[in-house]
Image (cartoon, rainbow, N blue to C red):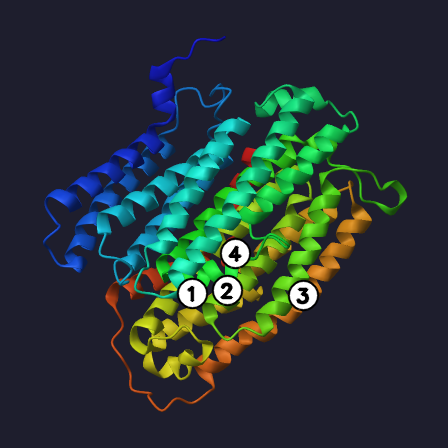
Amino acid sequence: MTPVDYSRLLLLLAPEMILVITALAVLAADLIWARDLKDRNRHTIAFSITLFGSLAAVASLMMGTPDPAGATQWLTLGGATTTVKIGLIALTLSALAISTRSPLTSHIGELYLLTLLATVGMLFMASANHLLLAFIALELVSLSFYILVALYRHHKPAAEGALRYFLLGGVSAGFTLFGLSFIYGATGSMAFDQISQQLDGSPPSPLLIVGMVALVIGFGFKIAAVPMHLWAPDAYQAAAPPVGALIASASKLASFYLFARIWTVVLADVAGRGADSSLSAGWLILLAILAAASLILGNVAAIAQTSLKRLLAYSAIAHAGYILIGLMGEQADGIAAVIYYLVTYGLAIVGAFALVLLVEGSDGSDQITAFAGFHRRYPLESFCLLIFILSLAGIPPLAGFFGKFYLFAAALKSGLASNLLFALVVLAVAMSAVSLYYYLKVLKQAYVVPSPNTARRRSDPVLRVVVILMAIGVVALGCFPDILVGDLVADLK
């Protein structure tokens, strides 16, 4: 066995170590000094420490590592992984910023501890180069989220939603571990590069096929793809808006990036073919089925929703379908498109959840009808809502449009499944038209439907800053997509 250089390993794990120390510092400060202060002051102290630690972690990432190319058999660093990690930290900070204005829980230190531990898990998911590390990181994130959903104790659906999330998550973890064990049995290795070398273009064995199917089921839960989506609407509605924002944004970015690396890098040689002339077994067919089902069910079910949280949950299921199409495209272009799409989607979804928190705080409801007359009560916030909704719907020149464009372009370039992917892209375009209906329902309430209470209200300054920053990010990445996409493609090639 190759000896481990622990001093070098600590340097490679500097961002994760900084966040772990930050989490412990926040918990200690809250328990020792801030316990008797008002909740808002405790949040201020906790967020200040978290902001300092997060900036230190980002600085560590931007400085790079002594030997990122050599990394270890457990980790891969640099390039697109660094971009994903910075995006994860930024989305986590945004979610924590809006949590300072949420009556989520009186356990402030525990809230920040769990959130930062989930972030550490997501960073490990992004850099995992070994199936065992990927599974451990995945479960660290999942366990943290189960507790975070349940922390919203004064909200009656929270306990039921957290329990359902936990039970379905436990089943999905079993399938994931089952799939990993079969892949290990078929290849004799759990390191990404060694598995890829073992496969070397040979047809998948029955053992490997079973492993891939089980892995698709396990990961399908994490990305809320049909038919493993049942937890999402209940968890989104039961969780406090900051927790829902974190699950919908950062968690999706980490899960899909790990998912993309496993399928398009580790198992690239067993993709199969979906062209009419050469239909063959592989993960391509599995992802195509998931993508089509997610697109149809997510968009159709969202039409009937009256709660904005549940609407966002079903739209997230549909967005999982769009992203899966990108994963089946050309490797570098597809993964770059997926990262760009998820970062911009994360910005829009965090902003949307911040506005849900604003309306819940003033009207006590997350119903779409609670947004009636929103543009009169909060003119600036309503304009940001317009940006978020239109970006999610894929309207140019916002980032959501270019995200879909890059996903579909990467898919259509692929020679593995030209006919199959062309049909999926046509379905995705049609479902995007369907999505306009339920997204415009929200804007209709905000801008058209009259409300008896149209007096202008003072917005919370923290929520306003977060919402404006998210809107600026969506517009900027829409007008200048090469800021992110160009570097990603260069890093991945």
> SS of the residue at dot 2?
helix
Mark 2 and mark 3 lie on one chain; the one further toward the N terminus is 2
Which is closer to the viewer, label 4 or label 3? 4
The CA span between labels 4 and 3 is 22 Å
User: Which residue is the site of mark 3?
Assistant: 431
Which residue lies at the image location 45% right of the left edge and 23% below the top edge? 68
| Quadrant of the rendered image containing residue 121 | top left
Position of residue 470 in the picture relative to residue 322 (left or right): left
Which is closer to the viewer, label 1 or label 4? 4
Mark 1 and mark 3 lie on one chain; the one further toward the N terminus is 1
| Marker disc for residue 401 | none
Q: Residues within 10 Å of mark 3 (few under 14, many from 20)?
A: many
Question: Residue 393: where, in percent of width, then height?
Answer: 57, 66
For the residue pair 381 and 73, the one nearer the viewer reads as 73
Question: Residue 438: where, in percent of width, then height?
Answer: 57, 73
| Marker disc for residue 312 | 2
